Image: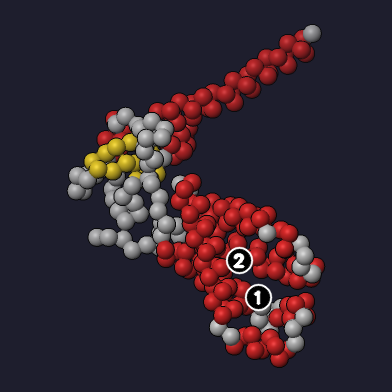
Amino acid sequence: MVFLIWLVVFVVVVSFLLLLPAYWRRAISERYSGGRPVACPEDRQSAVVSIDVRHVAARVMDGYPNLRLSDCTRWPEHSNCNQECLSQAVQAEPYKPGQVKAGRKQIYHLPVLLAAFAAWYVGLIWHSHYMFRELWAHDVGLTHTQVKQMVSWLSPHLLSAAVCLLFAYGVAWLLAVSHRKGVLQGVLMSLLLCGAVIATSWYGIARLPHDLLVLEAGYTVLATLTVGAIVGGLYDKLVLRSQ
């Protein structure tokens, strides 16, 4: 009986210790979340900003509460500002869900182009004679002469580059509509898009020879990770910033 009482007390104490930080974080989230209208101190133009709730919660738990912005509709072109609008953001009433989305994202073309080129170049090396060209030609059923002729053609290279570019833009679009950025988020979106493409074309993919399927799966995974890491990691960094 005594053991049961101590067990109940232990469960209650542990639950309290676990729920208190969760409740604290939820209160902070309710206090600071949401897009907030401000007037930019630099030129008094209207903008919508969002406060970095995770940073606030972490610093409050550390005993050093401070505020910073996590997004702004004028970023990344003006992301090097000193965030003087923080006091306005704290006092402003946040928009209700569905009214305005803070930090409206857009697609930045330089990371997309770089990611598409990287994926295309990875494919060029992957299918070169230094790696798997002989195995690929054998699985496809082409002779050495036919492969040499195909290498000199322009259309296969243009087609593969177009596919890489289309996929990179698809990843950038997913990041834009979901308001996410970063290497991890880019990789996750890239894997999600790749999975969707595979699912919609699985009937044709499953008919490929086993060795060819394994070979192309290896390149697909490598290209998918490359595109996701570049597009997500450079999402709002590799841009032309206005003065």
Q: Is residue 198 above or below residue 162?
A: above
In this picture, residue 194 sits left or right of residue 88: right
- Residue found at the far front of this picture: 203
Q: Nearer the viewer, residue 9 or 127?
A: 127
Tell me the SS state at disc 1.
Answer: helix
Task: Report the front residue among 104 and 229.
Answer: 104
Residue under pointer 2: 223
Residue 194 in percent (x, y) is at: 62, 57
Q: Earlier in the sequence, mark 1 or mark 2?
A: 1
Q: Would residue 229 be seen by someone viewing this image from the given angle? A: no
Relative vertical location of residue 194 with respect to residue 96 in this rendering, above or below? below
Res 126 label: 1
How crowded pointer 2 is (Cα within 10 Å; few <14, some 14-19, many 20+) is rated as many
Left or right of 243 on screen, residue 97 = right
Q: In the figure, residue 203 lies in which quadrant?
A: bottom right
The one of 228 and 166 positioned closer to us in this rendering: 166
Residue at coordinates 68% horizontally, 59% vertically from top-left? 201
Instruction: State the SS at label 2.
Output: helix
Q: Give the amino acid at mark 2.
A: Ala
Q: Quadrant of the N terminus?
A: top right
Q: Residue at x 68, y 19 (%)?
A: 11
Q: Position of residue 80 (x, y in %)?
A: 31, 54
